[in-house]
Image (tube, rainbow, N blue to C red):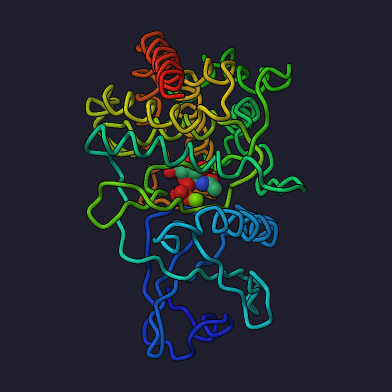
Amino acid sequence: MEIDQAIAQQFDCPRQVTRISPLGRGHINDTFLVLFADGPDHVLQRINHFVFPRPEWVMDNIVRVTQHLQAKVAHLADCHQRSLKVIHTRMGRSVHLDDKGQYWRMYSRLHPMQSYDQLQTPRQAYFVGRSFGEFQGLLADLPQPRLHETIVDFHHTPRRLARLLHVAQADPQRRRARAQREIDFAQKREHRVEMLVEAQRRGEIPERITHNDTKLNNLMFDEAGNEPLCVLDLDTVMPGLVHYDFGDMIRTGCATAAEDEEDLELVDFDRQLFSGICQGYLEAGRTFLTPREVEHLAFSAILMTLEVGIRFLTDYLEGDLYFKVHHPEHNLQRARSQFELVRKLEAAESQLHDLVMETWTRSGEMETVAG
Ligand code: GN1
Ligand code: MG
């Protein structure tokens, strides 16, 4: 895709663009690295306006969240590496609407770092859990007003399932026959999809500010790849449940195969990585998590994996309107791989639950000793 340099020049950044090249592996927005002759590199993104119907809401949230985070880490020597920084337009806006109706934003570029699609060591897993836990902790005191819901019902799993069944019924692309087994797989789990939203409705678990897209590659590690420094992709930071973040962290951080792995025999999760994420997350969450929240964490890994599988499958049936795909069966392949991971997680559910509860108890005992 050719990008007009004039877009970059709308923003309050150096003026002489030397190169614009594609960057990143996200499924939603288009990201570009912009190099300048007269200053540091920047990152330009086209916000997917179909996915985010109110880009200005997305940016309102992100400006508030990044400013809050920057203030919290200002005392650290590497504070500029620890949070995204929004570059406003020369008119002082956080988003630029071009004459084709496309929405753009700019960030200053972080120093070289790296991200992963799969983790290698339990130590890394520990840091992943801790980073997203700290992220939730840092945003716990974000001043009012409530953040915008940039995508309504984003993690309302019962509504995601209802939509899948509705689309399957209508079958607009005549793809249903290819996906019947997967549709049945999701439908069989109808009784479980309400667990979290119901617990929230009963007041057992609280609304918090959560990231809502804690896919492993949304976390940037230092150059050596040991410790994470910065959380990216803040488009869906909004009111949510901590489970949405924990579940997606497990889904992507413990997986032994790619999200779209074709060979289902390779799809599983790694228990040591699970344990690492769990330890890091509960350690960071000690200051704010309630026991009731902790009780649902193991289940949330199953639910979030099921939910994204349902979303891939729905998109397949609708003709790939939402997620970027590389071939016509890609979304179906993703759904299959995610449902296989659901099977593996379900088979281990009670052990995973015990592991979470033991880790929680242990982190409490350690705190008592230390305190
Ligand atoms: C999308 O933007 P990216 O690639 O980090 C999606 C997530 C899914 C993920 C699956 C706004 O995340 O919800 O879990 O793909 N983001 C949005 O890979 O829908
Ligand atoms: Mg995203």
The one of 107 and 228 positioned closer to us in this rendering = 228
- Count of numbered labels shown in the rendering: 0
**Vertical comparison of 135 with 313: above or below:** below
Residue 71 left/right relative to 335:
right
Residue 319 left/right relative to 97:
left
Q: Residue 371 at what x, y percent from top left?
A: 47, 24
Using the rendered image of the protein, determine whether residue 319 is visible from the camera's viewpoint: no
**Vertical comparison of 25 with 170: above or below:** below
**Vertical comparison of 328 with 43: above or below:** above
Indicate the quadrant containing the N terminus: top left, top right, bottom left or bottom right: bottom left
Q: Residue 322 at what x, y percent from top left?
A: 53, 49
Residue at image position (49%, 40%) is 134
Q: Residue 176 at what x, y percent from top left?
A: 50, 32
Residue at image position (63%, 77%) is 98
Residue 10 left/right relative to 186:
right
Residue at image position (57%, 35%) is 171
Residue at image position (54%, 28%) is 243
Farthest right residue? Answer: 145
The quadrant where residue 113 appears: bottom left
The one of 279 and 312 positioned closer to us in this rendering = 279
The one of 183 and 19 positioned closer to us in this rendering = 19
The quadrant where residue 347 appears: top left
Residue 311 left/right relative to 194:
left
The one of 166 and 42 positioned closer to us in this rendering = 42
Using the rendered image of the protein, determine whether residue 305 is visible from the camera's viewpoint: yes
Q: Residue 248 at what x, y percent from top left?
A: 45, 34
